Amino acid sequence: MAKHYRLLIGGEWVDGDKGEFDIVNPATEQVIGTAPEASVEQALAAARAAQEALPAWSRTAPSERARLLNLVAEKLQERAGALVPLIISETGATALVGSRMQVPVAIERFQRYARGAMKDLNIPLAPSQIGATPLAAGGLIGAVVNRQPVGVVACISPYNFPLVNIAGKIAPALAVGCTVVMKPAPQDPLAVIELAEIMHEVGFPAGVINVITSSAPGPSVALTETRDVDMVSFTGSTGVGERIFEAGGKTMKRLLLELGGKGAGLVLDDANLDTAVGAIASVWSFHSGQICTAPTRAIVHTSRYDELVSKLAAYAPNLKVGDPTSMDTLVGPVISAAQKGRIESYIQSGADEGGTIVVDGRNPAGLDTGFYVGPTLIADCKQGMKAVQEEIFGPVVVVVPFEDDDEGIAISNSTEFGLYDYVFSADIDRAYRTAKQLRSGNVGINTAQRNHDTPFGGFKMSGVGRDGGDFGMLAYTEMQTIVWPG
């Protein structure tokens, strides 16, 4: 709490022009520190610094980029003991999620893209026999698709996994030769500033990495509008993504937008219900449902509907809600009082529109302090209900029945989102055929596990572009064709 955090702009640590703003622990409602309040001018200065550093960094040997990325991973490992409690205090993540899914995954991403920096992404093409034209003599024409760094990337990250998400943006961008401006979410920016300190310490050249923080939207808006930023990589709500898309169009910015989700857990009549329940219940236990990939809509065949609702209702009370620093806590707080109120309004709307609140997580017993919402299960839902259509981003599962596979697929595809869906069936061929009919960027069959080398992103209003694995490096490059006479 005593630490004084600053912005990093062009290799210099500076105070925020607008002072500081408080960072609040969602579990205790206590201020745990302050972050610098950047001005619009400082955001623009960070973008200019990144633009000035781009030519030299883009020509830096891949081995040097890899060395620096590996050093970041090593330093993160050394400081994990201090970073994990900080992230738990900022985000409200449980000790289990904080210790396993926050810092360790960030370390893995830096290591992954240190290896990736050494990969040649260029695509050689076979020579082509071209006849003479008014432009030039004919002959054998050779060609290569050169993958060139896109330029300066503004990396704007969400509050649920601040360190992991920013690592997933900046590590591949830096690996291919881009420079970056990091803009973490205002609710929990301190660990990202700590990351910037590590990167500065290990020797990244001035301007290659920059960090600004702000509780006001102005600095982020400036990054989406300035010509000194070539690309915006954003993870967050669809509403904000729409505004970034519109603002970026004026300067033809490249965009990587990973936006909202309303994951369908499609439970077919032959599904193993224990498998389905285990995956769907992750909505409650994995960061209190504050994750865009969660299967928040259980879409269940009528023959298995009552049994699945009963199993979920029996599962929920076993999840301890409370102090996130306790290792046996499985459901911590949500990020803020505003988000708590928003989630509770969706629960009420579910009841108002005819749903049955089977498990009510509002105001869990014994938790008068902190922004807590417990596991909530709403049954008897219909396709058009607000709680079924809109992203809640909290520990709420809605259950919708269907009569046959075609109806189940139609309900799954009925929202404006298409990020991550799930199919549960004992018949893998049937599940695979069903998965291919879902309008979703990702589909899990009988699992909620991820493969981090796959392309990740969404259909429809869930975003634009893909990251993850080598696809994450391709996202931060432009294709340049170079031809010559053979």
Image (cartoon, rainbow, N blue to C red):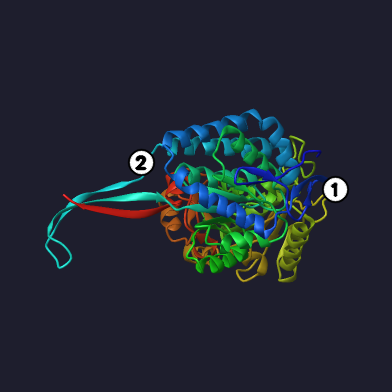
Q: Is residue 68 left or right of residue 429?
A: right
> Few, some or many C-alpha atoms within 10 Å of disc 2 (few <14, some 14-19, many ≥20)?
few
Residue at 72 percent across and 55 percent down: it is 376
Q: Position of residue 175 (x, y in %)?
A: 47, 42
Q: Which residue is mark 2?
A: 120
Instruction: Pick the residue in front: 227 or 427.
Output: 227
Residue at 74 percent across and 48 percent down: it is 35
* Image quadrant assignment for residue 414: bottom right
Query: Is residue 96 among the parts visible in the rendering?
Result: yes
> Up-down: is 29 above or below 328?
below
Q: Which residue is mark 1?
A: 367
Q: Position of residue 338 (x, y in %)?
A: 77, 59
* Image quadrant assignment for residue 347: bottom right
Disc 1 is placed on an element classified as loop
Amino acid tagged 1: Leu
* Image quadrant assignment for residue 377: bottom right
Which mark, by number, is residue 243? none
Instruction: Pick the residue in front: 356 or 15.
Output: 15
Residue at 45 percent across and 52 percent down: it is 475
Q: Position of residue 180 (x, y in %)?
A: 55, 49
Instruction: Pick the residue in front: 413 or 113.
Output: 113
Disc 2 is placed on an element classified as loop
Query: Is residue 267 among the parts visible in the rendering?
Result: no
* Nearest to N terminus: mark 1 or mark 2: 2
